């Protein structure tokens, strides 16, 4: 038992170091459905923490579709898609998503349990030891993990710097090349130069993998950042998540049919994972109908974004240059970000502090997430609360 005690002591020492550095993470217990305000640890807080950008996570039509789906399909898929878990509801949703996003002519889609799994599947399927992944320096962790698991060269370029990417592509001798990028960056809120990245992908015969977790449903009239940028190509592999603006859960990949069939046949993250419950596909069908047809939600969201940015510029923290629902306030020091988040909670607002390693050292921040569910008074109240906090 002495050996086990030593190992436990090592873990405890490492955890203490995290706490001392202001990097310890805690889970807050939410006791209500998602919405503009939530009950957290017994307190009602106006939430600026959620990625529910269109307010669909608690929408009555989506809830009704989920209930009807449970009545029809039950609550579990039973197995992986390739065994017996692929329902008519899954197939209909995939067909609908492929047509809606349309990364290329005749695109198909395939569903995954999460965006993390989807990105691991894409990268490890399309490149291997003889390949190279060219990744934006601020990409989400799952794209980086996919590059590492693929055993390809992992070449990172400066954030949104297409010239730096071009130089790295020009000197690469890799047999297969893959450019991977967030579309809307999850902690900065800015948008990748997708049109230029596609030009480079064409020039260097590379795949372009676009992680649109935070753009789907919000930009391009809901179709995402490809529509926003006005691009389409057989070399684009598009990943969209369904637990953020779509309000439910899961993810999908849309691409040329040959790419989708290759993922279906060989991606371990797809082949060996139980399918999501069909009731979620039914809920997502209702959600997608709202995304497609209810432009008022997006208009309201963008009005709220403009309102926060106009008022937030007077605050003593740097407001990142973001046109999206993600509005970071840079604090620099991790302890300062945590303290500011706590002060806001005392004033009735939930805004999470984001610290390394999620963001680079020295760039700890508050991540303000806006939703169509918010009211203008919520924005004004948050700005007033921030102004009253001690820096």
Image (spheres, rainbow, N blue to C red):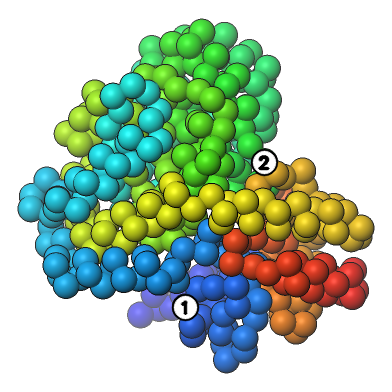
**Measuring 48% from the left and 83% from the top, which residue is drawn there?**
32
**Measuring 53% from the left and 58% from the top, which residue is drawn there?**
54
Q: Quadrant of residue 99?
A: top left
Q: Residue furthest left?
A: 84
Q: Is residue 40 left or right of residue 94?
A: right
Residue under numbered circle 1: 33
Question: Residue 326's x, y, as percent?
Answer: 65, 53
Q: Is residue 47 left or right of residue 277?
A: right
- Asked whether 141 or 105 is in front, the reply is 105
Quadrant that contains the C terminus:
bottom right
Mark seen at residue 77 = none
Residue under numbered circle 2: 190
Q: Is residue 345 left or right of residue 309?
A: left
Question: Residue 180's x, y, as percent?
Answer: 49, 30
Against 327, residue 177 (above or below) is: above
Question: Residue 195's x, y, as percent?
Answer: 57, 21
Q: Mark 1 vs mark 2: which is more N-terminal?
A: 1
> Mark 1 and 2 residues: CB-CB less than 8 Å, in contact?
no
**Measuring 51% from the left and 8% from the top, which residue is drawn there?**
203
Q: Quadrant of residue 96?
A: top left
- Asked whether 282 or 162 is in front, the reply is 282
Against 119, residue 237 (above or below) is: above
Label 1: how many Cα within 10 Å (few below 14, some 14–19, many 20+): few
- Asked whether 42 or 223 is in front, the reply is 223
Q: CA distance from mark 1 to mark 2?
A: 29 Å
Q: Is residue 13 visible?
A: no
């Amino acid at each position: 038992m002495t050996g086990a005690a030593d190992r436990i002591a090592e873990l405890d020492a490492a955890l203490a170091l995290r706490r001392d550095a202001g990097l310890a993470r805690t889970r807050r217990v939410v006791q209500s459905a998602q919405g503009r305000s939530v009950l957290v640890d017994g307190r009602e807080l106006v939430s600026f923490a959620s990625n529910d950008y269109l307010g669909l996570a608690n929408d009555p039509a989506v809830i009704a579709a989920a209930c009807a789906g449970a009545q029809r399909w039950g609550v579990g898929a039973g197995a992986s898609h390739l065994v017996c878990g692929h329902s008519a509801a899954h197939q209909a949703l995939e067909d609908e998503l492929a047509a809606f996003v349309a990364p290329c002519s005749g695109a198909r889609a395939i569903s995954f349990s999460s965006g993390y799994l989807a990105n691991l599947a894409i990268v490890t399927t399309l490149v291997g030891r003889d390949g190279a992944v060219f990744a934006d320096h601020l990409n989400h962790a799952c794209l980086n993990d996919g590059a590492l698991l693929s055993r390809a060269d992992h070449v990172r370029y400066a954030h949104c710097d297409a010239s730096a990417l071009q130089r790295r592509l020009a000197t690469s001798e890799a047999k297969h090349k893959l450019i991977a990028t967030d579309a809307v960056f999850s902690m900065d809120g800015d948008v990748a130069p997708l049109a230029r990245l596609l030009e480079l992908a064409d020039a260097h015969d590379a795949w372009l993998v676009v992680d649109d977790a935070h753009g789907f449903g919000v930009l391009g009239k809901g179709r995402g950042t490809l529509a926003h940028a006005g691009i389409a190509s057989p070399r684009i592999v598009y990943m969209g998540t369904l637990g953020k603006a779509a309000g439910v859960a899961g993810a999908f990949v849309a691409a040329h049919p040959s790419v989708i069939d290759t993922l279906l046949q060989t991606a371990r993250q797809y082949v060996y994972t139980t399918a999501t419950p069909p009731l979620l596909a039914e809920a997502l069908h209702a959600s997608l109908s709202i995304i497609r047809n209810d432009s008022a939600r997006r208009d309201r969201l963008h009005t709220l974004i403009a309102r926060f940015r106009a008022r937030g510029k007077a605050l003593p923290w740097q407001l990142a240059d973001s046109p999206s629902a993600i509005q970071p306030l840079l604090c620099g020091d991790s302890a300062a970000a945590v303290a500011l988040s706590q002060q806001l909670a005392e004033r009735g607002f939930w805004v999470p502090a984001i610290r390394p390693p999620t963001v680079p050292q020295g760039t700890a921040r508050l991540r303000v997430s806006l939703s169509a569910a918010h009211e203008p008074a919520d924005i004004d109240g948050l700005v007033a609360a921030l102004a009253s906090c001690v820096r």
